[in-house]
Image: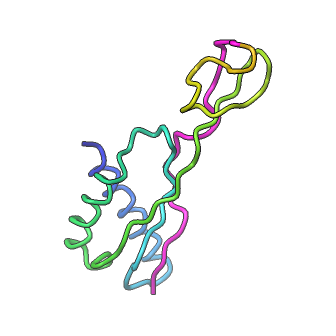
Amino acid sequence: MHELGIAFHVMDTVEDVAKENDLTQVSSVTLELGEVSGVVFDYLADVWDWAAEKRELFYGSKLLLETIPAVTICLDCNRTYPTVRYGRTCPYCNGDKTELVTGNEINIKEIEAC
């Protein structure tokens, strides 16, 4: 389960930001999570809740999610399309020379703190 490692990495990063900005309590962290990132948000939220109880800065904090849609570009016809629906085959020209443009990211979008 790599979700635990992701939760720790996000918390470590937020702790660095909190120190730089003299923050004492984080109430929520909003993550942008790519649709094909391979992260199971429910697992991530569960380990977040567990880890938040062990770190004073995060006690009682919530992990919020915004999904980044997966979009692929066809290198043959130069059109983009939804990755999850069509996979690696372009729905416009049936080309298979494609690359993922978005949808694999994990970004910290917002930290709500005091």
Task: Give the left or right position of residue 45, taking residue 79 as reference.
Answer: left
> Residue 26: x, y in percent?
39, 78
> Residue 64: x, y in percent?
44, 65
Is 31 located above or below residue 60 in the figure?
above
Give the residue at x 32% y 78%.
57
The residue range painted magenta reads: 94-114
Magenta: main secondary structure: strand
> Residue 22: x, y in percent?
45, 84
Task: Give the left or right position of residue 63, taking residue 111 as reference.
Answer: left
Is 106 located above or below residue 26 in the figure?
above
Is 25 located above or below residue 38 in the figure?
below
Task: Give the left or right position of residue 78, taking residue 102 as reference.
Answer: right
Q: Is residue 102 magenta?
A: yes
Is 93 located above or below residue 26 in the figure?
above
Task: Give the number of marks.
Answer: 0
Nearer-the-camera pick, 23 or 67: 67
> Residue 9: x, y in percent?
36, 55
